[in-house]
Image (spheres, helix red, strand yellow):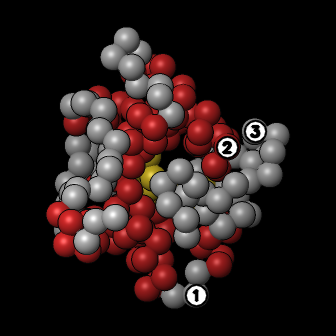
Amino acid sequence: QGSLSDLLRTPPRTVPLITLTEEQEHELGVRVASEILSMNPLVRSSFNAYATTLARYLAWFSERPLTFKGYRVALVRGKDPGAFSAPSGMIFISEGMLDALQSEEELAGVIAHEIAHVAHHDGERALRQEGRTDQGLDTTSKVLSFVDRTRALLGGAASGGAPDNLSRGYDEH
């Protein structure tokens, strides 16, 4: 048993990041986003532009204010409350989540939370933790494993099961 000062000096155990260029991360994010949108269609709404502007403002206060193509937010069909971020700054908010929010401040909190996942490369870390990021795997294989995870998180009906907590694997809300 170490002292408190020993614990504070010991770095937390973290999973190493996948080594991706910004362009590769963007490609991964686009592929994941495409799969998400195939299961949960985009809702065309002025909300998307507003929320994207809000996300880009909030990102300036994060550890990663810029991504390869910038942060983007999209409202997706789905009655269950949830939000999800894909690599490279794509953020999805379900209609159920939007309905559950009581204020603009709560929306900002949800978006800021998802920005933190992007800034910390949590999507990439989740791939690493699943053991699916061996050097021999190509980006498509990485995307497919991430998509399987996305199906379980976002597409309860699409995956044949009940929707799970959208943040499982990253944190508990």
Determine the image quadrant of residue 50: bottom left
Name the disc covering residue 151, or none.
none
Quick one: 6 or 19, which is closer to the camera?
6
Q: Amino acid at mark 1?
A: Gln
Q: Residues within 10 Å of mark 1 (few under 14, many from 20)?
A: few
Among all residues in the image, which is located at the extreme top? 136
Q: Which residue is mark 1?
A: 102
Q: Which residue is mark 3?
A: 159
> Can residue 127 be seen here?
yes
Reply above or below: 10 against 18. below
Quick one: 46 or 116, which is closer to the camera?
116
Q: Find numbered disc 1 in the image and state the secondary structure of the residue it sits on.
A: loop
- Measured as percent of width and height from the top left, residue 90 is found at 41, 50
Quick one: 152 or 104, which is closer to the camera?
152
Determine whether label 3 and label 2 are within 8 Å by CB: yes
Q: Residue at x 59, y 42 (%)?
A: 150
Q: Amino acid at mark 3?
A: Ser
Tag in front: 1 or 3: 3
> Can residue 49 be seen here?
no
Q: Which residue is mark 2?
A: 152
Marks 3 and 2, the one that precedes in the sequence:
2
